[in-house]
Image (spheres, grey):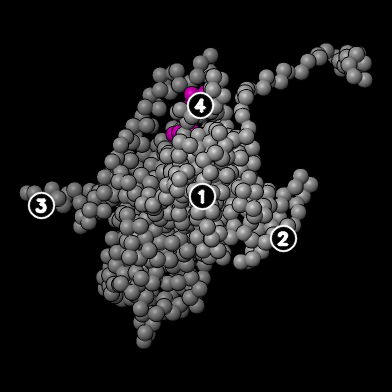
């Protein structure tokens, strides 16, 4: 079974700065890495391959330097990498991004499972995975924490919920987004790193994936980011000090004056 | 300092450093306390291909050399010298096969070791044969197409955990040094047992046990080289492996130094960080310089080994002697730099000091290293006359 894993290159920090003029991320001087959530997707895809055979193709949409993320994915056990890169993709929202990726996936063709991380650490939308399945018109299971059974036609997986988990049976092909509970990603291997260095990465433009030009990039994006801002930090609470009796009395007075 | 490592060496260094930081450092104290063998870490090292870096490609390795092995050992030792020893000792057990084994023996055993699927161990020391390795009592008697081994090996690193053992035993006691032979013995061979796990001062996560042979039948095909070559195999092995001990010592010293320096930068006394005091600054300068000198010697010797140089005893002994004495001094100073906190088990530095001590003792005590170095120097001087 061929498996596709969608990954994103993100800045390696949780406190990235935002350019207030353009409302976009300031990427200068910040190392780029594979989105941490996607590491679980890669690991699960590679484990699936080790279990049922086939090959794993890592796909990313991004600038030319996102090629490094694909090579890192190959070092972790993926077989091939596809970089979908074109200036026409600039400014894509989650709709346009998932459309673009789905077009690339259709070009790859012949897949049983698509695995995505549950969300990216920079945008945090968790929409691209489900978006891809919608564009491809295949079933999706989000927040997968375990793949119980899988064969050529169906899979039984556990979907994490706030209270516990659902057991979902789905026909294939199917898209899963996975949570970190699903596995512990392995370290890269030296042989994998060497293979990654010489591996050929396919580079596809908008024309290569036969995409509708009107559905790409900023023009193809129905949403607009109007403003990104840092919420004001919560102010510290009020401290009441003194003897236990005085404190209790003052607190009671304060509470009376508020909601109670 | 830039040691002009090649591309593969930089790759393995960075990967080993990452494994040390992310996987070993968080559990080092826990394994020291429990004295368990760190199998989960060995699995990570195996999956990362690090066990095979010094083994030729035709035997499933990556074709690097002793320098590659030293670089990995050093990086792992920065987090835990005991866990690093599980790795390095497998190399010690593999070296007799690599250096003196037949093509069949190499093909059979090295890929398993290179893939980390099996660990190896080297069995030389006995209760009455420490520095005087020629005093070994373990015997191997040939009977048909088998050798019958009898005797007890002591303080064998990785014993019980490893699957492949290279064992030195006497095939002809009358011949003395020329009467020893080397064998490959697989775990599970009838007549091979392990003693209880030793309780040690340091390197507590490393498994140290007796290996006991009682009428243990080993196929004659497992004889390495030929009868009488056992001590030559052992000496060649130790000459080749000693830079690895030096690298372990350098790594532990660096690990202790990193912690102590970070602590000293933030420890405020008399209204300023203690790094503001010249007494502390001079300690930092000395420690950093000593570590770098030992690393430079270790890498230089490892490169010499990899070049295929024939006579390496002197240089190999020098690297082990200098780096281990350095590690004992630097780790002790690291504890001193941190004062009472350094002495507490809440911080990792006292463990580095306990772990470092063994590097002055095993693979030949530093007194024996000095004998080797002096003998070589005097011999060379005589040859010049």
Answer with the quarter of the image where residue B218 lies.
Answer: bottom left
**Residue hosting label 1:** A104
Gap in angstroms between the C-alphas marked 3 and 1:
74 Å
User: What label sits on residue A26 in the rendered view?
Assistant: 4
**Residue B258 painted magenta:** yes
Asked where in the image residue A110 lies, by quadrant, the reply is bottom right
The answer to whether residue A4 shows anywhere in this view is yes
Q: Is residue B188 above or below residue A225?
A: below
Element at label 3:
helix
Residue located 40% across and 19% down the image: B278
The answer to whether residue B247 is seen in the rendering is no
Q: Same chain for marks 3 and 1?
A: no
Q: Are marks 1 and 2 in contact (CB under 8 Å)?
A: no
Residue bearing mark 3:
B383
- Mark 3 vs mark 1, foreground winner is 1
Residue A169 tag number: 2
Disc number lying in front (4 or 1) = 1
Please state the horizontal and vertical placement of residue B304, each as a whole percent of the image: 24, 50
Check disc 1 and report its element: helix, strand or loop.
helix
Percent of width and height locating residue B114 = 40, 61
Q: Residue at x 58, y 44 (%)?
A: A98
Real-space CA distance between mark 4 and mark 3, rounded to the nearest whole angstrom: 69 Å
**Highlighted magenta segment, given as a residue range:** B256-267
Q: Principal SS element in the magenta part? A: helix
Q: Is residue B258 left or right of residue B291?
A: right
């Amino acid at each position: 079974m061929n498996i596709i894993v969608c990954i994103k290159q993100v800045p390696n920090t949780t406190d990235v700065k935002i350019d207030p003029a353009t409302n976009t991320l300031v990427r200068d001087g910040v190392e780029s890495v594979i989105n941490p959530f996607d590491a679980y997707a890669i690991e699960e895809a590679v484990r699936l391959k080790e279990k049922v055979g086939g090959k794993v193709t890592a796909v990313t949409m991004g600038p030319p330097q996102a090629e490094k993320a694909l090579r890192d994915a190959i070092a972790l056990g993926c077989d091939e990498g596809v970089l979908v890169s074109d200036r026409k993709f600039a400014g894509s929202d989650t709709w346009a991004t998932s459309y673009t990726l789905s077009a690339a996936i259709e070009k790859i063709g012949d897949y049983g499972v698509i695995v995505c991380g549950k969300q990216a650490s920079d945008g945090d939308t968790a929409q691209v995975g489900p978006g891809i399945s919608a564009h491809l018109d295949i079933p999706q299971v989000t927040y997968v924490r375990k793949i119980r059974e899988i064969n050529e036609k169906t899979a039984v997986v556990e979907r994490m919920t706030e209270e516990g988990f659902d057991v979902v049976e789905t026909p294939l092909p199917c898209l899963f987004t996975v949570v970190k509970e699903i596995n512990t990603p392995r370290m890269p291997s030296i042989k994998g790193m060497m293979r990654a260095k010489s591996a050929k990465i396919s580079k596809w433009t908008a024309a290569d994936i036969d995409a509708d030009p009107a559905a790409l990039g900023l023009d193809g994006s129905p949403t607009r980011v109007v403003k990104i801002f840092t919420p004001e930090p919560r102010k510290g609470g009020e401290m009441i000090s003194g003897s236990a009796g005085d404190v209790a009395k003052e607190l009671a007075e304060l509470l009376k004056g508020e909601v109670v | 300092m830039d040691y002009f490592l090649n591309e593969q060496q930089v790759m393995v260094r960075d990967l080993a450093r990452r494994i040390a930081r992310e996987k070993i450092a968080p559990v080092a104290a826990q394994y020291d306390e429990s004295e368990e063998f760190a199998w989960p870490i060995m699995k990570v090292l195996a999956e990362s291909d690090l066990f095979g870096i010094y083994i030729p490609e035709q035997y499933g390795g990556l074709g690097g050399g002793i320098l590659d092995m030293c670089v990995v050992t050093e990086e792992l030792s920065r987090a835990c010298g005991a866990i690093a020893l599980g790795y390095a000792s497998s190399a010690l057990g593999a070296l007799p096969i690599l250096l003196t084994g037949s093509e069949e023996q190499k093909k059979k055993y090295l890929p398993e070791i290179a893939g980390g699927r099996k660990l190896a161990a080297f069995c030389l020391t006995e209760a009455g044969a420490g520095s005087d390795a020629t005093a070994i009592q373990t015997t191997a008697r040939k009977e048909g197409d088998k050798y019958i081994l009898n005797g007890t090996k002591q303080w064998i690193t990785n014993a019980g955990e490893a699957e492949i053992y290279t064992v030195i035993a006497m095939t002809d006691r009358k011949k003395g040094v020329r009467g020893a032979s080397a064998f490959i013995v697989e775990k599970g061979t009838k007549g091979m047992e392990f003693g209880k796990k030793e309780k040690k001062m340091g390197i507590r996560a490393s498994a140290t046990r007796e290996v006991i042979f009682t009428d243990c039948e080993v196929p004659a095909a497992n004889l390495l080289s030929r009868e009488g070559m056992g001590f030559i195999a052992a000496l060649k092995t130790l000459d080749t492996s000693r830079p690895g001990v030096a690298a372990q010592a350098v790594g532990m010293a660096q690990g202790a130094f990193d912690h102590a320096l970070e602590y000293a930068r933030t420890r405020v006394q008399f209204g300023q960080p203690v790094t503001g005091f010249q007494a502390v600054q001079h300690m930092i300068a000395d420690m950093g310089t000593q570590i770098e000198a030992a690393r430079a010697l270790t890498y230089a010797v490892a490169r010499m080994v990899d070049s295929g140089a024939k006579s390496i005893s002197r240089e190999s002994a020098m690297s082990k002697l200098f780096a281990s004495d350095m590690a004992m001094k630097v780790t002790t100073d690291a504890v001193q730099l941190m004062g009472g906190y350094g002495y507490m088990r809440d911080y990792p530095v006292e463990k580095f000091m306990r772990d470092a001590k063994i590097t002055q003792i095993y693979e030949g005590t530093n007194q024996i290293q000095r004998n080797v170095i002096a003998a070589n120097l005097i011999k060379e001087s005589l040859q010049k006359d």
